[in-house]
Image (spheres, rainbow, N blue to C red):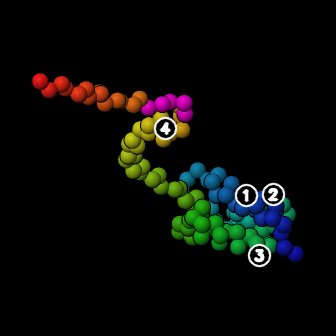
Amino acid sequence: MTLSTADKSNMRKWILMVVASVKSSTGVTIQRIKKFLDSKQVGISSKPEMKLTLKKLLETGHLGKKDGKFVIKKSRKKIPIKEKKRPKLSPKKSGRNLNYSKSVTKKPIQTEKNEN
């Protein structure tokens, strides 16, 4: 019998809990993970989905292996790229002050000069 999706997500959460609960960086053995899972739900550690869940956690990078033990993989903080300054948009382009009207400069009227 296969596990429901709720059981699978609980198993995934419990595996991450037991690995994260270790204070040192030595890791957790598979036996300790199985013992913790059985304490939560009897017989869940003997299901084939447990190995698949561990494998998926390793593939996605949530867990890692160190000396044959499972450890939490800490994500590296990305160094932010220096943000470029965006030019300020004019009120018309930004959608603000829609009632804003441009001032129009008029050319001075040229008067005809009387030639004498």
Q: Alpha carbon of mark 4 to alpha carbon of mark 1: how far?
A: 54 Å
Asked if the stretch drawn in magenta spans residue 12, the answer is no
Residue bearing the label numbered 1: 14
Q: Residue at x 31, y 30 (%)?
A: 107
- The residue shown at (44%, 32%) is 102
Choose top left, top right, bottom left or bottom right for residue 68. bottom right
Which badge, 4 or 2, comes first in the chain's sequence?
2
- The local crowd at label 3, few if under 14, some if 14 to 19, many if 20 or more residues have their Cα within 10 Å, is few
N-terminal label among 3 and 4: 3
Disc 2 or 1, which lies upstream in sequence? 1
Residue named by callout 2: 40
Q: Is residue 60 visible?
A: yes
Residue segment shown in magenta? 98-102
Q: Amino acid at mark 4?
A: Lys
State whether the magenta stretch is mostly helix, strand or loop: loop
| Residue on which the image places disc 4 | 92
Q: Which residue is mark 3?
A: 48
